[in-house]
Image (cartoon, rainbow, N blue to C red):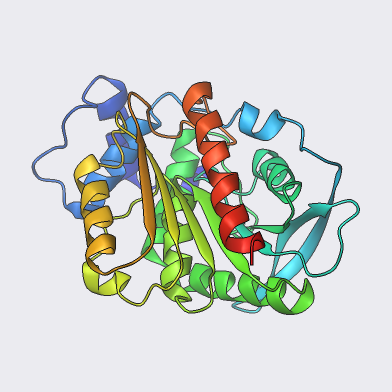
Amino acid sequence: MRRLIPSLVASLLAAFVLGACSTTPANLGTEQAADAAMAAGHAHDAPVATPAATTAPSQPTTLERVVYATVEGRPVEGWLAKPRDAKAGLPGLIVIHEWWGLNDNVRDEAARLAAEGYVALAVDLYGGRVATAVPEAMGLSQGLRKNPGPAEENLRQAYRYLEKTAGAPRIGTIGWCLGGRWSLKAAMLMPKDVDATVIYYGSAAVPEAELAPLAMPVLGLFGSKDPVIPLSTVAAFEANMKKLGKPVDVHVYEGARHAFANPSGTSYEPVAAEDAWRRTTAFLRENLQAR
C-alpha cells in the first residue's frame, strides 16, 4: 500500500505535523495546496470508530455485502443496509465513505441511516482498498482525484442499483469529508435524478455554472474551525445556490473542526455531530419520505 504514496505526501505531512498547519507554501499549486490542507486537518488522525458508527440504530437492520457495479471490468462490492422488517419501496441512500475508505465504521453508519427508513448502499470508491494510516488515506484520495472517471461510473451504477434492483422510488446522497465532496459530485453527475444531497464538510468550491443544473435540495454541514474547507468557499457555494434559486440549507457549527461527525477518526465533536444528525434525518425525511 505504501508504495502508492507519492513523495509529495510525505513532505506535506512532515511540514504540517511539525507545526506548519496554519500556512500553505507559496510555491504549492492548487491541488498541492488542497493536499496540504488535508494533511493539516488529519495530521494526527486515525480511523477509530466514533459514536456516529457505534450508536445503535433506532431499529434492527440487516446488512448484506452486494456487488452493485462493474467498473473497468471489475466487480465493485458495497454494503446494503435496510430495516429488518423493511417493506418494498423504501427510498434509497448512496452512502459515500470518508478518505479512509469503506471500512466497518462506514458500514455501521449506513445501518444507522437505514434504520431511519431507507435502503442504504455504502459504496466503495477505492476498489476494495482501506487506509489505516494518514499517508495511505492521502495516497488513495489523491489517486481518486487524479482519475475520477471510474468513481463517477461507480456512482452512476450505484444509483441504478438502488433504483432497479432495490426498487427505491427516490434516492439521496450523503458523505463525509472526501465523501461529502463526492456526494455533491454525484448530484452534479445526476442532477435530474438525485432527490436530495447531504454534504458533510466536503469541498463545495464549484463554479456557479456547474451548479445550475441541480434540481434537488442540498444540505451542507460545516465547521468554523475546519482547516480543510475554507469558509469563504462555503459562503460562495451558498450564495451561488441562492442566486440560482436552488433549495439549499447551509449550517456552520461554531468552533467545530474538520471531520466533527465522521464515522471514523479522532475529531468527533458530540454536540455538533448530534445536531447535524438531527438536521440530516429531518432533511432526508422531508425530501425522500414525505412525498
Q: Quadrant of the C terminus?
A: bottom right
The percent coordinates of residue 136 (x first, y second) are 49, 42
The percent coordinates of residue 281 (x first, y second) are 60, 46
For the question of whether residue 69 can be seen, the reply is yes
**Residue 169 vs residue 270: left or right?**
right
Q: Quadrant of residue 184?
A: bottom left
> Toward the viewer: 115 or 137?
115
The image shows residue 230, relative to residue 287, as above or below, that is above
**Residue 71 vs residue 79: left or right?**
left
> Toward the viewer: 226 or 98?
226
> Toward the viewer: 219 or 55?
219
The furthest residue to the right:
85
The residue depicted at 34 percent of the width and 66 percent of the height is 246
The residue depicted at 41 percent of the width and 55 percent of the height is 181
The image shows residue 115, relative to residue 69, as above or below, that is above
Count numbered badges in the picture: 0
The furthest residue to the left:
26
The residue depicted at 33 percent of the width and 27 percent of the height is 254
**Residue 44 vs residue 27: left or right?**
right
The furthest residue to the top:
19
> Toward the viewer: 187 or 177?
187
